Image (cartoon, helix red, strand yellow):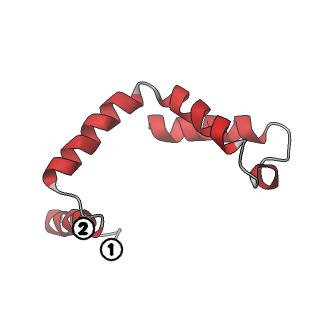
Amino acid sequence: MNYGATSAHTGHDEAAAYLELYRLSPEGLDRIHEFGKTASSRIGEIIEKWYTWVETQPQYEQFFSEPGTVERVKRLQTGYWEE
C-alpha cells in the first residue's frame, strides 16, 4: 500500500484493501466506530487494566525492569489513544 498517496481515489482503494485484508464488512466497521466512541471515554481505565494483566506475564521484567518505565509508557499510550 502506498501511504504517501494523496488522491481521493487512491485513499478509497487503500481503505477497501484494509477492509478486505481484515475481512471487515460495513456493519463491522460501524461496530468498531461505536466501540471507539465508548472506549475513548475510558482509555485510562483500559490502559490500567491492560498493564495489570501485563504485570502477570513472564516477560514483564524483560521490558519493564527500569523504575518508571511502566508509568512513562502508560503516559505515552494515553497520549497516543487520545490523539
Which element carries disc 1, helix, strand or loop?
Answer: loop
To which residue does mark 1 refer?
A: 2
Amino acid type for the residue under numbered disc 1:
Asn
Q: Earlier in the sequence, mark 1 or mark 2?
A: 1
Q: Residue 21: horizontal and vertical position, in percent? A: 29, 69
73 or 62: nearer the viewer: 62
Q: Residue 9: horizontal and vertical position, in percent? A: 14, 67
* Number of marks present in the image shown: 2
29 or 73: nearer the viewer: 29
**In the displayed structure image, the side of residue 49 where residue 37 appears, left or right:** left
**What residue lies at 51% left-to-right and 41% top-to-bottom?**
80
Q: Residue 39: horizontal and vertical position, in percent? A: 39, 32
Structural distance between the alpha carbons of marks 1 and 2: 8 Å
Q: Residue 8: horizontal and vertical position, in percent? A: 16, 62
7 shown above or below 43? below
Q: Quadrant of residue 56?
A: top right
Residue 37 tag number: none
> Which one is closest to the eye, mark 1 or mark 2?
2
Looking at the figure, which quarter contains the C terminus? top left
25 shown above or below 73? below
Asked if the residue under mark 2 is in contact with the one under mark 1, i.e. CB atoms within 8 Å, the reply is: yes
**In the displayed structure image, the side of residue 36 where residue 60 appears, left or right:** right
Q: Quadrant of residue 5?
A: bottom left
Amino acid type for the residue under numbered disc 2:
Glu
To which residue does mark 2 refer?
A: 14
